[in-house]
Image (cartoon, helix red, strand yellow):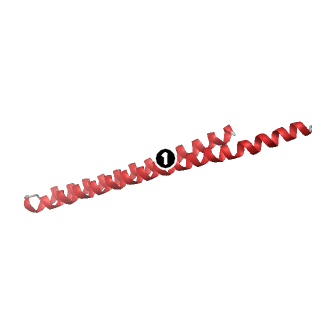
Amino acid sequence: MRKLFAGMMITFLLGFPAARWAAGQNRDQFRTESKTLKARQKRDWKTMKAQQKIQRRSWNSAHMSKANRVQAKHQMKRDKQNLHQQQKNERQDLKDSQRLSKERSRQVR
């Protein structure tokens, strides 16, 4: 019984740092994934804003009816909402995948 207990303790003590190291690796991987996702989303957002700004400036030189301007504004607003929702879904997908991998790593231990 003592040998079994001693063997289990030694296994636990030797395995614990390895498990912590693996968990740390996952955490670093999640940080880099979230940072790249944030950077890409920020870049996409700035690109969309710049495109909309250029489009609004073009309205000054073009002769557009009020109905066309209103329609274009609504379309820009819809594009903005769609991008926001898409980015929100991407962030949630990343969080879900992180949770799944954490659960898998806990089950392996």
For disc 1, the marked residue is: 94
Kind of element beneath mark 1: helix
Residue 17: % across, % down: 68, 46
Kind of residue at badge 1: Leu
Side of 28 relative to 38 (left or right): right
Residue 62: % across, % down: 8, 58
Decide which of 93, 108 is in the foreground and name it: 108
Residue 70: % across, % down: 20, 59
Find the residue positioned furthest to the right. Answer: 1
Residue 45: % across, % down: 32, 55
Does 104 sit above or below residue 38? above
In the figure, residue 49 lies in which quadrant?
Answer: bottom left
The residue located at (65%, 47%) in the rendering is 20
The residue located at (16%, 55%) in the rendering is 68
Pointer 1 local density, CA inside 10 Å: few below 14, some 14–19, many at least 20? some
User: Where does the C terminus fall, quadrant-wise?
Assistant: top right
The residue located at (26%, 55%) in the rendering is 76
Side of 88 relative to 47 (left or right): right
Decide which of 14, 28 is in the foreground and name it: 14
Decide which of 106, 55 is in the foreground and name it: 106
